Image (cartoon, rainbow, N blue to C red):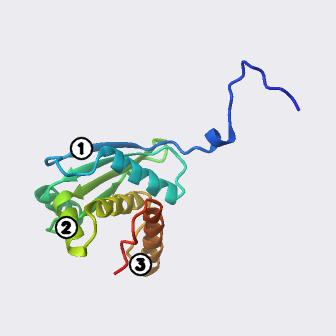
Amino acid sequence: MSKQSPLAPRTSQRSAATIPEPRVSLSYGLARAGLPSSTSFRRWVAAALRGAKHRKPAELAIRIVDIDEARALNNAYRGKDYATNVLSFPAELPPELKLPLLGDLAICAPVVLREASEQGKPPKDHWAHLTVHGVLHLLGYDHIEENEAEAMEALETRVLAGLGIADPYRL
């Protein structure tokens, strides 16, 4: 067995396999009181990336919006004149640009809180679910076709279970 030089950098199997922490930029279009912490959003984003086996560096922006901003965004980009819970805007970069940018999420705080109440869920669990859901959309997951929806929902459920959160699709 050969000895490693005391001047050589030490590496370990663990550090080589470590997934880089995602860079998450948060902005707010309403008062922050009562909203999850930036640490929570970062933890949920990291869990979604791990669950989807995304091993590369990742950057995204999350904007927490009010009803008016969510409605305007949904109308402008989807032609739907109402506020929805989460909107995902995947980055559309030229292939020659090798940037880790995944895209942007807009999450509507009043809709998240209303839905959590209507569904009898802890608000923080619903915030986590919608963050994970949005990140998966940024990675290309969708739920238009039934088989895609089943795969995406199963992945969301596994990711959330890893965070100690109950299946959001269970009645």
Which quadrant, please, contains the C terminus? bottom left
Q: Earlier in the sequence, mark 1 or mark 2?
A: 1
Q: Earlier in the sequence, mark 3 or mark 2?
A: 2
Amino acid type for the residue under numbered disc 2:
Gly
Distance CA(mark 3)–CA(mark 2): 20 Å
Please tell me whether mark 1 or mark 3 is closer to you in this view.
Answer: 1
Query: Please, what secondary structure does the residue beneath circle 3 have?
Result: loop
The residue pinned by badge 3 equals 145
Q: Residues within 10 Å of mark 3 (few under 14, many from 20)?
A: few
Q: Are marks 1 and 3 in contact (CB under 8 Å)?
A: no
**Residue located 53% across and 46% down the image:** 56
Q: Is residue 55 above or below residue 79?
A: above
Residue 110 drawn at (x, y percent): 16, 61
Q: Residue furthest right?
A: 1
Residue 65 drawn at (x, y percent): 18, 53
Residue 83 drawn at (x, y percent): 16, 65
Q: Residue furthest left?
A: 68
Q: Is residue 154 above or below residue 102?
A: below
The residue pinned by badge 2 equals 79
The residue pinned by badge 1 equals 27
**Residue located 25% across and 49% down the image:** 63
